[in-house]
Image (tube, rainbow, N blue to C red):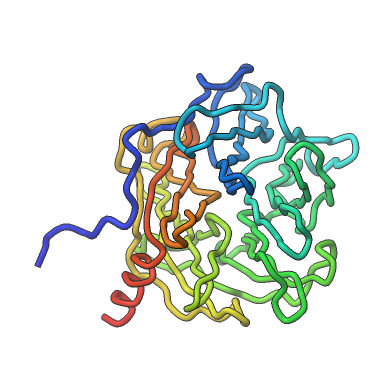
Amino acid sequence: MSNQYPELFWRHKRNPILTAADWPYPANSVFNPGATLLPDGTTLLLCRVEDRRGHSHLSVARSANGVDDWHIDYQPTLLADPEHFPEEVWGIEDPRITYVPELSKYVIVYTAYTRVGPGVALALTEDFRDFERFGMIMAPEDKDAALFPRRIGGQWALIHRPVSAPGAHMWMSYSPDLRHWGDHKLMLEARRGGWWDANKIGLSPPPIETAQGWLVIYHGVRQTPAGAIYRLGLALFDLEKPERCLKRSDEWIFGPVENYEQRGDVDNVVFPCGTTLAPDGDTLHLYYGAADTSIAMATGSVRALLGWLDEKVAD
């Protein structure tokens, strides 16, 4: 028996692949990107860019190989618009991108930072230049949200993470039109006690549809005397009733170990908001914020993640 935990994600040797020094205009930090593959195979990242006020906006970076030679928009791609959307007064951040074939559009779900805390906002785009903004769809305090790529039971479905006194758990909500949401269901609870994901969890990238179910990578936050540690775990949910958890890992699978993940504006954080799936249907590229300072990438396998989850739950 090996005395090492298995590696499910392999960090790219060029990490961090994007930093504020790469930006064509002044930025304090770049992190927590949403990700998608465009029809021509280009990797598009919608990056959170924070300025020296502490406010964030979103900016597009494109790469043919998803690793280097990034072409970054010369101006912010999507700015907060507090004149028309007052809930964005303190910035917008942490986007998740879902391509929805029924709409032939990308749905971006992001955090709008209000005077009373973060809420969930939504926008549509075909080209990442023009955006149809819906404004806030979930009131504060709520964040870590993403849309499923297809209707479920005739309704659009959203994962999000409201905060209440007992803790921060993952919830499902449904909508007929992407604007009005209800039928709220608890999806996954934060554990209690000494667990790595006690008291506070949240969705990381959007869910990945597999034959076995919706594969979800989620983050858990462990509070220690030295501060919080953000790590990642796995769970699998029913395809037609995604609030039903089929399997959940006890162990975390990816955490801050490299210097660029352990030291930054917020130490000890790995925080992915996007993945891309290679044409082989298995190779998964995970794009994540490292220590709230830079962007890094790691590669895994959907089959390996599902196999590991099967083995761990069976044990």
Q: Measuring 55% from the left and 59% from the top, which residue is drawn there?
A: 203
Residue located farthest toward the left when viewing the structure as drawn: 1
Query: Foreground: 15 or 270?
Result: 15
Residue 314 seen in render: yes
Q: Measuring 77% from the left and 47% from the top, which residue is drawn there?
A: 125
Residue 265 seen in render: no
Residue located farthest toward the front when viewing the structure as drawn: 40
Query: Foreground: 54 or 232?
Result: 232
- Side (left or right) of 52 relative to 3: right
Q: Measuring 48% from the left and 44% from the top, which residue is drawn there?
A: 288
User: Which image quarter: residue 81?
Assistant: top right
- Side (left or right) of 238 relative to 83: left
Above/below status of 263 relative to 209: above
- Side (left or right) of 53 relative to 302: right
Above/below status of 130 relative to 74: below
Query: Foreground: 204 or 262?
Result: 204
Q: Measuring 83% from the left and 72% from the top, which residue is drawn there?
A: 176
Residue located farthest toward the right when viewing the structure as drawn: 84
The quadrant the C terminus occupies is bottom left
Above/below status of 228 relative to 5: above
Q: Position of residue 1 (x, y in %)?
A: 9, 68
Q: Position of residue 191 (x, y in %)?
A: 44, 69
Query: How many numbered marks does the figure carry?
Result: 0
Q: Position of residue 25 (x, y in %)?
A: 63, 17
Q: Position of residue 71 (x, y in %)?
A: 59, 27
User: Which image quarter: residue 309?
Assistant: bottom left
